[in-house]
Image (cartoon, helix red, strand yellow):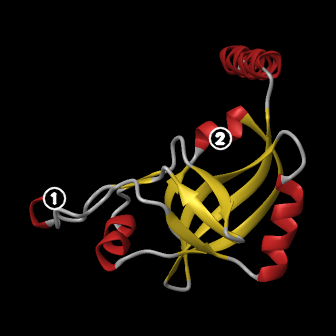
Amino acid sequence: MPTYADNKEARFDYEILETLEAGLVLRGIETKAVRQGKISLRGAHVRIRNNRPVLINSLISPYQPNNTPETYNERRDRALLLHDSQIKKLIGFQQRQGLTLIPLRVYNKASRIKIEIALARGKKKYDKREYIKKRDFERRKQRELRVKV
């Protein structure tokens, strides 16, 4: 199951509450570009429009830049495929204050391109600082143990 894109920034900026797998609706040239890894999830998010989830602000670079139609939009909104029960659940969760839907990774599953989305709550600045302190402490501790051995 190869991973084409991973949103590492999201795991740092958000507290992940729940994850879901969704299908990603792509056009032909976008599919080839994603399989080459020409996709970025930085700054992307998911919104519910007309009771359908939509991936917003994700970047899929052209498969062949010299042979791309002039109408090609790298940051167009892309529909996500979910069951109706999952969509209703997401709508209920998203109406709570402070919760958002973010994409975590794009991967291949049985020759289909899937996206893992998460229901998340934004971290406060002091939470991020605390995480950085813990991470740096663990690194220093491991470094000291390696030096002593």
Binning the other alpha carbons within 10 Å of mark 2 as few (below 14), some (14 to 19) or many (20 upward) gives many
Residue 21, relative to residue 131: is it above or below? below
- Residue in view at x 59 percent, y 64 percent: 54
Which SS class for mark 2? Answer: helix
Binning the other alpha carbons within 10 Å of mark 1 as few (below 14), some (14 to 19) or many (20 upward) gives few
Q: Amino acid at mark 1?
A: Pro
Q: Does any portion of residue 3 appear in the rendered image?
A: no
Q: Does any portion of residue 149 appear in the rendered image?
A: yes
Q: Residue 87 sits in which quadrant?
A: bottom right
From the viewer's side, name the closer residue of 47 and 148: 47
Residue 142, relative to residue 16: is it above or below? above
- Residue in view at x 74 percent, y 55 percent: 118
Q: Residue 126 sits in which quadrant?
A: top right
From the viewer's side, name the closer residue of 86 and 118: 86
Give residue 89's position: percent from left, percent from top: 87, 68
Give residue 114's position: percent from left, percent from top: 58, 72
The Cα atoms of the two marked residues, 1 and 2, are separated by: 29 Å
Give residue 42's position: percent from left, percent from top: 51, 42
Which SS class for mark 1? Answer: helix
Give residue 34's position: percent from left, percent from top: 39, 65
Q: Amino acid at mark 2?
A: Ala
Residue farthest to the front, as pictured: 50
- Residue in view at x 82 percent, y 63 percent: 91
Residue 47, relative to residue 110: is it above or below? above
* Disc assigned to residue 65: 1
Image quarter hosting the C terminus: top right
From the viewer's side, name the closer residue of 87 and 11: 87
* Disc assigned to residue 83: none
First reached walking from the N terminus: tag 1 or tag 2:
2
* Disc assigned to residue 10: 2
